[in-house]
Image: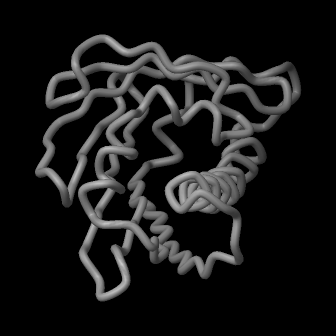
Amino acid sequence: MDTLEVTTDVRVPPGEAYAFLEDFPGYARYSKYLESVRQHGDGGPGTEYELTFSWWKLSQTFRSRVTDTEAPSRIDWEVLGTLNASGQWLVEETADGCRVSLVVTYDSGSARGVLDLPVFASFDWVAQRVVEKIAEEGERVVERVVADLEGQRRNVDLDVETR
Protein backbone atom coordinates (compact mmCIF):
# COMPACT_ATOMS: atom_id res chain seq x y z
CA MET A 1 0.00 0.00 0.00
CA ASP A 2 1.14 3.51 -0.81
CA THR A 3 0.17 6.67 1.04
CA LEU A 4 -0.03 10.27 -0.08
CA GLU A 5 -0.45 12.99 2.53
CA VAL A 6 -0.90 16.66 1.67
CA THR A 7 -1.00 19.08 4.62
CA THR A 8 -1.30 22.83 4.96
CA ASP A 9 -2.36 25.50 7.44
CA VAL A 10 -5.62 27.35 6.90
CA ARG A 11 -6.56 30.62 8.60
CA VAL A 12 -10.09 29.64 9.63
CA PRO A 13 -11.50 27.85 12.69
CA PRO A 14 -11.57 24.02 12.55
CA GLY A 15 -15.38 23.89 12.43
CA GLU A 16 -15.50 26.09 9.34
CA ALA A 17 -12.86 23.98 7.57
CA TYR A 18 -14.66 20.78 8.51
CA ALA A 19 -18.04 22.00 7.21
CA PHE A 20 -16.38 22.99 3.96
CA LEU A 21 -14.71 19.59 3.55
CA GLU A 22 -17.94 17.77 4.38
CA ASP A 23 -19.48 19.21 1.17
CA PHE A 24 -17.96 16.43 -0.92
CA PRO A 25 -19.96 17.07 -4.14
CA GLY A 26 -18.31 20.49 -4.27
CA TYR A 27 -14.90 18.88 -4.80
CA ALA A 28 -15.56 18.54 -8.53
CA ARG A 29 -14.96 22.27 -8.94
CA TYR A 30 -11.44 21.93 -7.49
CA SER A 31 -10.24 18.97 -9.46
CA LYS A 32 -8.85 18.91 -12.96
CA TYR A 33 -9.76 15.24 -13.41
CA LEU A 34 -12.93 14.81 -11.33
CA GLU A 35 -15.78 15.44 -13.77
CA SER A 36 -18.76 14.84 -11.50
CA VAL A 37 -19.86 13.72 -8.05
CA ARG A 38 -23.29 12.25 -7.29
CA GLN A 39 -24.24 11.96 -3.63
CA HIS A 40 -26.44 9.21 -2.14
CA GLY A 41 -27.10 10.11 1.50
CA ASP A 42 -26.82 13.05 3.89
CA GLY A 43 -23.01 13.29 3.94
CA GLY A 44 -22.53 11.37 7.19
CA PRO A 45 -21.30 7.79 7.69
CA GLY A 46 -22.83 5.45 5.12
CA THR A 47 -23.21 8.16 2.47
CA GLU A 48 -22.01 6.96 -0.93
CA TYR A 49 -20.65 9.01 -3.80
CA GLU A 50 -20.26 8.19 -7.49
CA LEU A 51 -17.12 9.91 -8.72
CA THR A 52 -16.35 10.13 -12.44
CA PHE A 53 -12.71 10.82 -13.29
CA SER A 54 -11.20 11.44 -16.73
CA TRP A 55 -7.55 11.62 -17.69
CA TRP A 56 -5.73 10.90 -20.94
CA LYS A 57 -7.82 8.23 -22.74
CA LEU A 58 -9.40 6.95 -19.53
CA SER A 59 -12.74 7.73 -17.99
CA GLN A 60 -13.87 5.78 -14.95
CA THR A 61 -16.58 6.02 -12.33
CA PHE A 62 -15.75 4.85 -8.82
CA ARG A 63 -18.03 4.61 -5.84
CA SER A 64 -16.87 5.67 -2.38
CA ARG A 65 -18.45 5.63 1.07
CA VAL A 66 -18.00 7.78 4.15
CA THR A 67 -17.03 5.26 6.83
CA ASP A 68 -16.76 7.50 9.87
CA THR A 69 -16.76 11.14 10.91
CA GLU A 70 -15.70 12.98 14.01
CA ALA A 71 -16.66 16.64 13.70
CA PRO A 72 -14.74 18.86 13.48
CA SER A 73 -11.57 16.78 13.16
CA ARG A 74 -11.95 13.80 10.81
CA ILE A 75 -13.82 12.44 7.77
CA ASP A 76 -12.91 8.85 6.79
CA TRP A 77 -13.83 7.25 3.48
CA GLU A 78 -13.16 4.18 1.34
CA VAL A 79 -13.49 3.28 -2.32
CA LEU A 80 -15.94 0.45 -2.94
CA GLY A 81 -15.35 -2.40 -5.36
CA THR A 82 -12.06 -3.89 -6.45
CA LEU A 83 -9.99 -0.69 -6.29
CA ASN A 84 -8.25 -0.77 -2.91
CA ALA A 85 -8.13 2.84 -1.67
CA SER A 86 -9.21 4.78 1.38
CA GLY A 87 -8.48 8.09 2.96
CA GLN A 88 -9.37 10.81 5.36
CA TRP A 89 -9.50 14.52 5.82
CA LEU A 90 -7.93 15.55 9.14
CA VAL A 91 -8.45 18.96 10.76
CA GLU A 92 -6.36 20.07 13.76
CA GLU A 93 -6.67 23.36 15.61
CA THR A 94 -3.61 25.66 15.51
CA ALA A 95 -2.87 29.09 16.99
CA ASP A 96 -3.84 30.82 13.70
CA GLY A 97 -6.71 28.56 12.58
CA CYS A 98 -6.23 24.93 11.68
CA ARG A 99 -4.05 22.41 9.89
CA VAL A 100 -5.84 20.41 7.17
CA SER A 101 -4.49 17.14 5.79
CA LEU A 102 -5.70 14.95 2.95
CA VAL A 103 -4.41 11.39 3.45
CA VAL A 104 -4.96 8.78 0.73
CA THR A 105 -3.84 5.14 1.03
CA TYR A 106 -4.02 3.01 -2.10
CA ASP A 107 -2.81 -0.11 -3.82
CA SER A 108 -2.15 0.85 -7.44
CA GLY A 109 -2.05 -2.84 -8.39
CA SER A 110 -5.70 -3.20 -7.40
CA ALA A 111 -6.62 -1.15 -10.45
CA ARG A 112 -5.44 -3.99 -12.71
CA GLY A 113 -8.52 -5.24 -14.52
CA VAL A 114 -10.62 -2.28 -13.31
CA LEU A 115 -9.35 0.20 -15.88
CA ASP A 116 -10.41 -0.15 -19.49
CA LEU A 117 -7.01 0.51 -21.08
CA PRO A 118 -6.50 1.35 -24.74
CA VAL A 119 -4.84 -1.30 -26.89
CA PHE A 120 -1.05 -1.39 -26.40
CA ALA A 121 -1.20 0.64 -23.17
CA SER A 122 0.85 -1.01 -20.46
CA PHE A 123 -0.83 -1.22 -17.06
CA ASP A 124 2.50 -0.45 -15.35
CA TRP A 125 3.00 2.69 -17.48
CA VAL A 126 -0.56 3.88 -16.78
CA ALA A 127 -0.26 3.05 -13.05
CA GLN A 128 2.92 5.14 -12.75
CA ARG A 129 1.27 8.11 -14.52
CA VAL A 130 -1.83 7.81 -12.31
CA VAL A 131 0.31 7.86 -9.15
CA GLU A 132 1.96 11.07 -10.41
CA LYS A 133 -1.48 12.57 -11.15
CA ILE A 134 -2.77 11.62 -7.69
CA ALA A 135 0.08 13.60 -6.11
CA GLU A 136 -0.46 16.61 -8.40
CA GLU A 137 -4.20 16.48 -7.83
CA GLY A 138 -3.84 16.30 -4.05
CA GLU A 139 -1.75 19.47 -4.11
CA ARG A 140 -4.12 21.28 -6.48
CA VAL A 141 -7.22 20.40 -4.46
CA VAL A 142 -5.69 21.55 -1.16
CA GLU A 143 -4.50 24.85 -2.70
CA ARG A 144 -7.96 25.55 -4.12
CA VAL A 145 -9.72 24.61 -0.88
CA VAL A 146 -7.51 27.04 1.06
CA ALA A 147 -8.29 29.85 -1.39
CA ASP A 148 -12.04 29.31 -1.02
CA LEU A 149 -11.93 28.93 2.75
CA GLU A 150 -9.88 32.10 3.25
CA GLY A 151 -11.60 34.10 0.50
CA GLN A 152 -8.44 34.81 -1.50
CA ARG A 153 -5.52 33.06 -3.15
CA ARG A 154 -2.18 33.11 -1.41
CA ASN A 155 1.05 31.20 -1.53
CA VAL A 156 0.23 28.03 0.35
CA ASP A 157 2.96 26.00 2.00
CA LEU A 158 2.14 22.38 1.28
CA ASP A 159 3.81 19.48 2.99
CA VAL A 160 3.55 16.58 0.55
CA GLU A 161 4.66 13.17 1.75
CA THR A 162 4.51 9.87 -0.08
CA ARG A 163 5.33 6.56 1.50
Q: Name the residue rendered at 59%, 19% in the picture.
A: 36
**In which image quadrant can residue 154 be found?**
bottom right
In this rendering, would 94 be left or right of 51? left
In this rendering, would 16 be left or right of 152? left
Q: Name the residue rendered at 45%, 77% in the picture.
A: 9
Task: Please determine whether, in this image, residue 29 is positioned above or below residue 89.
Answer: above
Q: Nearer the viewer, residue 150 or 65?
A: 150
Q: Name the residue rendered at 64%, 41% in the picture.
A: 30
Q: Residue furthest front?
A: 151
Residue 129 x/y as whole percent: 75, 50
Q: Residue furthest bottom?
A: 95
Residue 106 x/y as whole percent: 43, 50
Residue 80 x/y as whole percent: 33, 25
Q: Name the residue rendered at 51%, 31% in the picture.
A: 26
In this rendering, would 81 be left or right of 141? left
**In which image quadrant can residue 20 be found?**
top left
Q: Nearer the viewer, residue 58 or 24?
A: 24
Residue 37 x/y as whole percent: 51, 20
In this rendering, would 139 be left or right of 57? left
Q: Nearer the viewer, residue 157 or 97?
A: 97
Image color mode: one colour
Name the quarter where the N terminus is drawn.
Answer: bottom left
Q: Nearer the viewer, residue 122 or 27?
A: 27
**In which image quadrant can residue 34 be found?**
top right
| Total numbered labels | 0
